[in-house]
Amino acid sequence: MKKSRFTESQIVAIVKEGGAGVGIAELARKHGISRATYFNWRSKYSGVTVSELKRMKELEAENAKLKRLYAELALENAAIKDVLSRKL
């Protein structure tokens, strides 16, 4: 997936600027984005503050870590059960 030129905090600022009454065509020209990009960002980031965005990223990272840990433990548990069933 292509990496955005803008950080998420910049995107939130652009969306807030659009919500403050600046015209969409002017925003698109000023920041070098398309109208479709602005509307996609608005649907994803409207109503979100930078601090909420940071917290959400932290939670996503923690969730990914926990999923990896669970997968490793489930695999280990399955291997132990397999070994124990062979011995009996």
Image: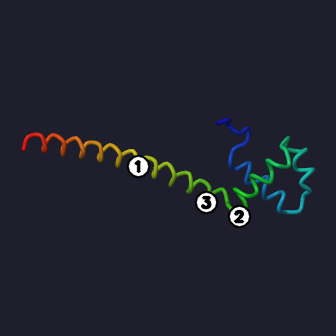
Q: Position of residue 38 (x, y in %)?
A: 80, 51
Q: Using residue 75 as the reference point, say whether residue 50 is left or right of it.
A: right
How many other residues sit within 10 Å of disc 2, few (<14), some (14-19) or many (≥20)? few
The residue drawn where x is 78% and y is 59% is 16
How many other residues sit within 10 Å of disc 1, few (<14), some (14-19) or many (≥20)? few
The residue at which mark 3 appears reads as: 52
- The correct choice, above or below, for 47 with respect to 53 in the image is below
Q: Using residue 79 as the reference point, say whether residue 45 is left or right of it.
A: right
Q: Amino acid at mark 3?
A: Glu
Disc 2 secondary structure class: loop
- The correct choice, above or below, for 56 with respect to 28 in the image is below
Q: Amino acid at mark 2?
A: Gly
- Nearer the N terminus, badge 3 or badge 2? 2
The residue at which mark 1 appears reads as: 67
Q: Amino acid at mark 1?
A: Lys
- Nearer the N terminus, badge 2 or badge 1? 2
Q: Alpha carbon of mark 3 to alpha carbon of mark 1: how far?
A: 22 Å
Image quadrant of residue 39?
bottom right
The residue drawn where x is 12% and y is 44% is 84
